[in-house]
Amino acid sequence: MKIVAFGEIMMRLNPEGYGRFVQAERFEVSYAGGEANVAVSLANYGMDASFVTKLPDNPLGRSARDAVRRFGVDTGDVVWGGPRLGIYFVEKGASQRPSKVVYDRAGSSISLASRGDFDWPRILRGAKWFHFTGITPALGGELPAICLDALKCCRARKIAVSCDLNYRGKLWSRDEAGRTMAKFMPYVDVLIANESDAADMFGIVGGRSDVEKGRLDRDGYISVARQLAERFGIGKVAITLRTSLSATDNIWAGLLYADGKASFSPEYPVHIVDRVGGGDSFGGGLIYALATGRKAQSAIDFAVAASCLKHTIEHDFNLVTVDEVNALAAGDVSGRVQR
Amino acid sequence: MKIVAFGEIMMRLNPEGYGRFVQAERFEVSYAGGEANVAVSLANYGMDASFVTKLPDNPLGRSARDAVRRFGVDTGDVVWGGPRLGIYFVEKGASQRPSKVVYDRAGSSISLASRGDFDWPRILRGAKWFHFTGITPALGGELPAICLDALKCCRARKIAVSCDLNYRGKLWSRDEAGRTMAKFMPYVDVLIANESDAADMFGIVGGRSDVEKGRLDRDGYISVARQLAERFGIGKVAITLRTSLSATDNIWAGLLYADGKASFSPEYPVHIVDRVGGGDSFGGGLIYALATGRKAQSAIDFAVAASCLKHTIEHDFNLVTVDEVNALAAGDVSGRVQR
Amino acid sequence: MKIVAFGEIMMRLNPEGYGRFVQAERFEVSYAGGEANVAVSLANYGMDASFVTKLPDNPLGRSARDAVRRFGVDTGDVVWGGPRLGIYFVEKGASQRPSKVVYDRAGSSISLASRGDFDWPRILRGAKWFHFTGITPALGGELPAICLDALKCCRARKIAVSCDLNYRGKLWSRDEAGRTMAKFMPYVDVLIANESDAADMFGIVGGRSDVEKGRLDRDGYISVARQLAERFGIGKVAITLRTSLSATDNIWAGLLYADGKASFSPEYPVHIVDRVGGGDSFGGGLIYALATGRKAQSAIDFAVAASCLKHTIEHDFNLVTVDEVNALAAGDVSGRVQR
Amino acid sequence: MKIVAFGEIMMRLNPEGYGRFVQAERFEVSYAGGEANVAVSLANYGMDASFVTKLPDNPLGRSARDAVRRFGVDTGDVVWGGPRLGIYFVEKGASQRPSKVVYDRAGSSISLASRGDFDWPRILRGAKWFHFTGITPALGGELPAICLDALKCCRARKIAVSCDLNYRGKLWSRDEAGRTMAKFMPYVDVLIANESDAADMFGIVGGRSDVEKGRLDRDGYISVARQLAERFGIGKVAITLRTSLSATDNIWAGLLYADGKASFSPEYPVHIVDRVGGGDSFGGGLIYALATGRKAQSAIDFAVAASCLKHTIEHDFNLVTVDEVNALAAGDVSGRVQR
Amino acid sequence: MKIVAFGEIMMRLNPEGYGRFVQAERFEVSYAGGEANVAVSLANYGMDASFVTKLPDNPLGRSARDAVRRFGVDTGDVVWGGPRLGIYFVEKGASQRPSKVVYDRAGSSISLASRGDFDWPRILRGAKWFHFTGITPALGGELPAICLDALKCCRARKIAVSCDLNYRGKLWSRDEAGRTMAKFMPYVDVLIANESDAADMFGIVGGRSDVEKGRLDRDGYISVARQLAERFGIGKVAITLRTSLSATDNIWAGLLYADGKASFSPEYPVHIVDRVGGGDSFGGGLIYALATGRKAQSAIDFAVAASCLKHTIEHDFNLVTVDEVNALAAGDVSGRVQR
Amino acid sequence: MKIVAFGEIMMRLNPEGYGRFVQAERFEVSYAGGEANVAVSLANYGMDASFVTKLPDNPLGRSARDAVRRFGVDTGDVVWGGPRLGIYFVEKGASQRPSKVVYDRAGSSISLASRGDFDWPRILRGAKWFHFTGITPALGGELPAICLDALKCCRARKIAVSCDLNYRGKLWSRDEAGRTMAKFMPYVDVLIANESDAADMFGIVGGRSDVEKGRLDRDGYISVARQLAERFGIGKVAITLRTSLSATDNIWAGLLYADGKASFSPEYPVHIVDRVGGGDSFGGGLIYALATGRKAQSAIDFAVAASCLKHTIEHDFNLVTVDEVNALAAGDVSGRVQR
């Protein structure tokens, strides 16, 4: 099944191990972005994933393209041009020291793209699913309009649409984000959010409580999902639930609200190798599960198991197979050596 | 005291850190094998350990030889020839993601060895102890016969024999393993098994329960050890007890059944650096303890403390000293800096 | 505010990751020492820190100088000469395996320094604070006399003095340490000790109990601090409280006894990246907090939060900002990614 | 233009820098093979290259697939199955010390492939060019027959065929190679050989002289090319001309014999970074040049410039663009920094 | 002697060894820029060098500051603010493959600086020398005006001024460069250019010939220097002379035209480790030599020997001592081991 | 044949690649020393080599022991004790920048050894050859006496003695060296020197000329060898001949003066990977060749070919086989890939 993801891919640079930026004599180089990460997950699961973006026609842009192509993502519709590749720097935290992300994405080729760059009817030919996140319109310029072009084309061709809200306070204000994203919601079939996106973008909070002390009661999360579903008429709303005990240890879970009913995944205590890209791997797992016809409980279980595994993998891409996710979702949490 | 270990040594290749195979631009190179690991442990403890195998006469075979020679193991009886060195690839797991081992050992020089390659009376001259594992006969070809040749030579010279069952389902079936190993058992003085080997090879399970949910009650393990001891008339049977909470955290312990009495070690919660070779380091510790005349409780305490430490050391070899093991066995689990 | 720290800086060599010395094909190279570590902390916090030592005039000595200069420490008063730079080797422990430090510092340039090398009135011109540790006089030779020279100069100029007892059994005996350090105590305004220094150097133990099983009751620690304060007439005594669960996991806290009243910090469970330099980072945090006028509770909270963060940073230097320490001291222990 | 390359791809392992095998604690991991290298060259030049092989369905096989997919090679026709991925070890020489290659390719999945594995009419649908080397049939088993199947299918569909003789004395004897390759020659349109292949496989040597002292006169090489062209009726014969001054410095050139006329490239003195894959990069450049309609002189110039650049690139793949090759072929040998 | 250098410092990222961008899994991280490189040279030679720039107040900006502070450069006058740190990517060439530099410096904090950011009378207090290059005004915005502010302040205070033309075609056109730089020339006491800058910026070429085939005759270079000196009334004009045999081997020399007389340095055949920063190290050597009163021949000899050594050092900074430069300038080119 | 080498082994630390000390964040760790290097050469050639020294009983001392044991050298006669392991730091030069060695060997365990530490009659039992260098007595203390003890024991047992003069100006004066070494010469059968040792230690220079401009005429070298042979009555005198074109390129050759006749080896132009240990590898090759009965020309050819190869190998040990040396000595200098 052909699935198209649209957004920015950046160069990711991080010191080795737990080094701080100021100590770094070397950076690990990888390439990632919210939608690219989802595309790689889907290709790893055997789907016909395509990633669409605009990249500078230089060795760095080509390296970003190669990074997703390596895992089987179709990059034939990448648009070439513009001045630069966005970059972000990641410093891995540990224990009480938080991870840090420094973005250097302003003026990237995709952020300066124009509506004419993307011929959506051609790009979406044969596609069954379209995925984007709130980061893409947040890049500004013509991107909100470009996203709307894509969504309208999806509607016309009955292509399913998933969206991860992914609010980024450094890119736009809550007001601007809320106004823009609200225009997209009518086109969205599957909405993904973390525990604070709904509050940040739409002012939606759980019934009695809010995101206080890092843990919301289950009813509160169901309430958030229901409000999102009802306000925008969205069929399926998924929320990731992260309890951050420290930079090293998190508890990870999720819920899927579908057809008026909430399904919760098990909770996984994760000892973190690399947490960046965790949310995207949830999206990748959920899209795969829903696109292949899984029921709600099975879908949320797959998505959370997939993203649980991501936390054990370096860099953003979730390099796991369907079999590996299924094994964890089936309950084997022992981590025993497989010979 | 001269101790001879016989088996395969392979090249071990693993990505750095927690990298997956598909991400690896570099592999760490080491050389290891069940019996070689034991020989290195013994040499580190100051014993006169000799390792016997067959290696290809090329730079890779010589590198494998050097790897054990570096730690003081005598390699003068290695046989040179045959086509290739076996290889195995290790991917280190974390949290819910299991470690993976991919073997590429078919057609190795040792697996194609012939009975004429090993002149046991010469090799075992002066030896007091002989060690092998179930992996060696599992390699097939003439190896079961070669093992039997060695065992008969040991019997004739009153050389003590230890055997680690080490069942490998990828190398032979349970039936074949059970039939072959049963022939060797009459020659064995010290038998080592993990929590599932006895069931896999001989159908021996604990009284009431079996290996369900990763934890067996103590009585069940005693029952397994007693059955092994009684069925084959073996004086000492040791069982390693691993509770796998995750790929990162295990609980590690062991029991030694000797003279009709079971001695349990303390349980160690281990935060894992490298788990591969853990069982072999238990064997190395146990042989050292028994060969130097320790009583059962002291022996199992030493063996489990030694192998607890192995989990904190990269690659298969257990590079610790007798003093370090004694300190842990004496109860210092605090890990305080030693200046 | 100008603060002068005086002591030895060494080359620190450690295998990468959890490698043992015998496995190391590479050592990470850094430069550190008890007082240099404090100076770097203070410069990171924006203070005008100066580090005084004697270094050999060769590329290694210059590299040591550059290592602290990089972080803004003034090195203009370093004395050049003597035969060699001290070295210490660190092997990082894990779980039940302790970290190991092997010192190779005998005969270093600073240990052979003479009183004439240091023109204290010039060096301390404009300084408001002087810091040293018990390691400096322990180096022997003329260093006890040199320290006394400095302390007298401080007294004459009303420069505040802090001292970290830092008993090192490999450098001097308890008797010699006690006798020498007792002579310095009358000059000290802020005294820092860990849970065993007071007992080792001055025979001071808690009221009822002593350092048994790694945990002392709070009253015992208060008693130790009070005895130190009263015996030597010291205004402020700080004690670091480490519970070593394993080489990987510690609980970290501290108390400050000032004006007859003890203030305890919160306890932090730390998952350790690098524990060496932890005590020095406590000293750096405490001096900063007191020198900038914080009250006792705020000061001990800052010092412990600062040193908690140090445990997550490779090598000895505590490369954190005031803002980062404040954020943790204010209670954010979640380690959430900061974008 | 669609071009299909068929052959083995292996894991390549080499010590970092100039390390010898016995010193290596790490191996660099890449994936390469004579035909895969050509396919990557062609994809880099913008052609629609497809690589066909058989790979084990395990993480190592998938990593090999990803390695060529990363650079845009179509891997959709890879056959999955069989026991293992072939491996080769490379030790980089320097000055008077030669580079060493140790092959461990016996029993690889492709070497055990059967004729039924490859549905040539489907694989070659739409193809305009087919490339293989003498290594593929040398792997034995059904591979000579599989190659013949492919060649007959090419003939039927008027697909151009290029072949690099690539004699490997460790894989087959001169006799066997000569007999087998002679059967393929009638199907070949472009034949590539190095200075000794023609002698090894077909006993063809230059007019007066032979490969003595590393340098043949130009007439001798023309004679070899003419004999190959005339004996087998091949339109174009290319010969690479390497003068090995040392492992570090070579002189590199080539000739193309077409339509009875020999065109020589310039000679390049190359300071070598990695010499392995040099011949394949010549093949890739020649195929690109001929397939895009270049004349003989331009084609040999492009092929030799491309492969000259390969000697400066780590690992087998020639990661250069058409523009870079053109710039060198146009005569800019200065290596000036391009800003 | 206090010397102030003003310009941009960037993060430099390069693949390890001879890796191409597309292969890089790691980048080496350093920080450099034309004027910062000169400042580090001068501090290494024992001068009181200060570097002035504008940096973003984030960990990357601070790391850039620390990189020069490490070598003793005063960074107290750095201005903090603005959006980002400029970045450039370097790919090291070899043999016929040129090195590549990809700049990503648009929108850096310094390029957006305003005249009000730099209080030149305060910054230049006590300075004897000011250095900048043609890159700084090429960054655009208010930088030409800021440079002029600085130059006028120098004139008023009789501060010597050196300028390296450093034409960068990617930053500005020849016309714009020529017009802007011409305005600065009346303030310049020492002008530095490479073999093409004078032609690019001012249309000045050698008497008979131009920069053809990479080698100009000596008379031509003298003519260029004389024209520069006479047109702008500059006392001393230095020209670097590079013959690029390949990316690996260059011939390096220089001339100094002073008081109507040209002094040529010896020619050094250099086997290149890292060529980037070579020109800046020439400037650093020349300024040191002239500022310490050397005569013309001695000055050009020192400058060329210093920059010859730079070609053997990784990254941009020329980390050599005066003694090392003197030794080479005195004629010891043998490279014998110094024990 | 059993050969005993006696001397110091140190830890060698060097920055990776061409890094300067001040840049180094990592050091490569190896262990080496003049006589240990010879012992490793001999073990690699299949001889029964034993290395005798005194090492501290700590992990660093044991690592040094393991480093030679790895290559098959017998370390059973190492004496354990004393305070520390000597260290030396190596910075690799390039082109005009010389390599630098910084020694930190004062106070090492071997330098403080006493005559009672070495029971020469036991150590030399069964030995046929004894090797030492001028460095060992230069360490001072009782070492000259210990060397004499060993030499007398050799004389008594008719053990052949080789000595490499290896003058180290940092360890002793020319006078002291000359007086001490002169006492040993009567016991020496094979004397090895480089082009300056004879002048430094014994004031012996070539007939007409001296070591001027790095090249001596052949007659001069023959004269030096003859004088050494005649003054001390030594049967065989070998001299290494190095022409240092730069730190990267040397010309390497040697002569053996035996029975009044001088045999010169070919000259090898070497492109250097690591030059340290080059002289020792010459000694190793020469001893092997003479001990196995080669004639003078064959012996000097083998010794020079062996040490030519050493220059291409990282670190001090010459890790080559007899076959590899023979191949080069037979004239294959092409460095062609061996598959």
Image: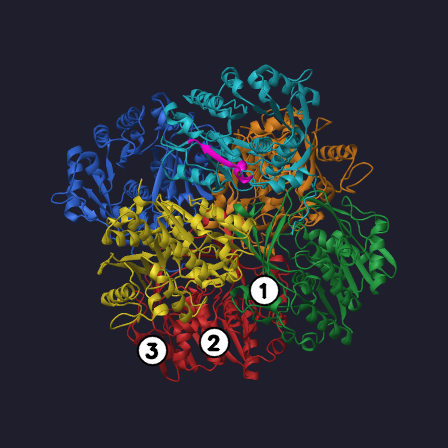
Chain colours: A red, B yellow, C blue, D green, E orange, F cyan
Residue C45 position (above or below residue E160)? below
* Residue occupied by mark 3: A223
Residue F327 shown in magenta: no
* Residue occupied by mark 2: A287
Amino acid on which disc 1 is placed: Ser
Amino acid on which disc 3 is placed: Ser
Q: Nearer the viewer, residue E105 or D126?
A: D126
The residue at 78%/58% (across/down) is: D202
Q: CA distance from mark 2 to mark 1?
A: 37 Å
User: Residue D108, labelled with which disc?
Assistant: 1
Callout 1 environment at 10 Å: few (<14), some (14 to 19), or many (20+)? Answer: many
Amino acid on which disc 2 is placed: Ile
The nearer-to-camera label among 1 and 3 is 1
Q: Nearer the viewer, residue D84 or A302?
A: D84
- In what element is the residue under mark 1? loop
Specify the subunit that label 1 lies on: D
Residue A322 position (above or below residue E43)? below
Q: Do discs 2 and 1 share a chain? A: no
Q: Position of residue A187 (x, y in %)?
A: 50, 80
Residue B212 seen in render: yes
- In what element is the residue under mark 2? helix
Q: Do discs 1 and 3 share a chain? A: no
Q: Position of residue A125 (x, y in %)?
A: 61, 79
Specify the subunit that label 2 lies on: A
Q: Nearer the viewer, residue F59 or F250?
A: F59
| Left or right for D286, reference C19 | right
Residue numbers of the magenta segment: F41-53
